[in-house]
Image (spheres, rainbow, N blue to C red):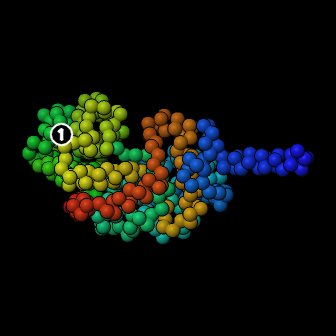
Amino acid sequence: MSDRKHQSRFLFALLGVVALFATGCDSAGTSTEAAGGGGGDCSMFEGETVKLVVPYSPGGGYDAYARMVAPHLAKELGGKVVIENQDGAGGLLAINNLMAAEPDGTRLAIMNGVGVAGGALADAEGVRFDLQDLSMIGRVAEQKPVFVVGGGTDYKSVEDVQAGKGFRFASTGPGAADFVNAQMLIQILGIDGRVVTGFDGSDESELAVVRGDVDGQTGDLDSRIDAIEAGDQRPMLVIDAERAKELPDVPAIAELDLDQQEQELTKSLIDLSAFGRPIVGPPGLPEDRLSCLRKALQSAVESPKLLAEADKQQRPLTWLSGDELDDRVKRLADAPAEFKRGLKDAYEQK
């Protein structure tokens, strides 16, 4: 073989190695481009400052998640990620303002998935956007909802609740996730009950359940698990397609004996619940920037260092890609009319 052919083969091999390192490899040898579901050059963010808006005041769960993820996302982007708190309208203000942001990826927001997505689907007062207009970057944490009753009640199963009369759910108010989930459970399971509002926050509503002032509530599993393990609350149902690993003996709503209409409503409720805590961008993000942000956020959320930090803070990370969130948006757009009416009722009640 001639020296020229040897040189050509060496050159092509060298270029292949350079290309491999340019895409980046994870510890398993998989390129981050493939793992990110789209790849793309992130050089447009090098040296840039990205504002990550938290739609609530400092100190809450959304704020904690955003501040935990921000430095790792900044590292992936090669720039800075700063937190901006923008409280107002139950989390809607920040998302409404995001709609007018420059579509260059330098302004993002962590979103209350159930509350904001439900409000958009219900065409609730104060919502100035369509859910499908948002650029879905990815979900950083799920909010697996669980239906619980007070540990001192006579309710031992969800069938007991269905057979009872005048069941009282606690909620912080119309449009909140605990209100939406309670209203939909009443509708899907035929519960003779109502939602009691007026609590200042989840701590106050949880205390009302424990004291027996109300019968039960819905809430995130990670927020309820301590009360469940202490025996102060008894889990009835996980609002998901599968049982929670933390509660292997508690049924998932999807496994109940439901008729066809109830099954369709349940699927839509599970799709809504799956939004959890997503990070979103304004409409019209160019494909290269959207692809880069999705890849960078996934790499950040799945990094061992951040996972260890999340475990230490007891704030679990559960990634869901922007493509998967887009699929749920499409499915919810085709949700049964009864589901959308139920959401509308949940946002309009006073």
Name the residue beneath numbered marker 1. 158
Determine which quarter of the picture holds residue 151: top left
In the figure, residue 132 lies in which quadrant?
bottom left
Task: Judge by depth and name the residue closer to the eye, 176 or 187.
Answer: 187
Instruction: Name which residue lies at 60% across and 37% down.
Output: 28
User: Which image quadrant: the C terminus?
Assistant: bottom left
Furthest residue toward top? 230
Q: Amino acid at mark 1?
A: Val
Can you say whether 275 is above or below 348 in the image?
above
For the N terminus, the quadrant is: top right
Q: Position of residue 337 (x, y in %)?
A: 24, 63
**Observer able to see residue 204:** no
> Where in the figure is residue 144, as x and y percent of width and height?
34, 44
Residue 53 falls left or right of residue 33: left
Q: Residue at x 18, y 39 (%)?
A: 158
Badge 1: residue crowd in 10 Å (few <14, some 14–19, many ≥20): many
Residue, far right: 3
Along the line of sight, which residue is nearer the eye, 95 or 337?
A: 337
Q: Report helix, strand or loop for mark 1.
A: helix
Q: How many marks are shown on the rendered structure?
A: 1
Name the spot of residue 224 as percent of width and height, x first.
Answer: 31, 38
Name the residue at the front extreme: 1
Which residue lies at the image location 56% right of the left edge and 37% below the top edge? 304
The answer to whether any part of residue 326 appears in the image is yes
Q: Residue 324: where, in percent of width, then height?
A: 44, 53
Quadrant of the rendered structure where residue 162 is? top left
Task: Residue at 49%, 65% (x, y): give it.
Answer: 282
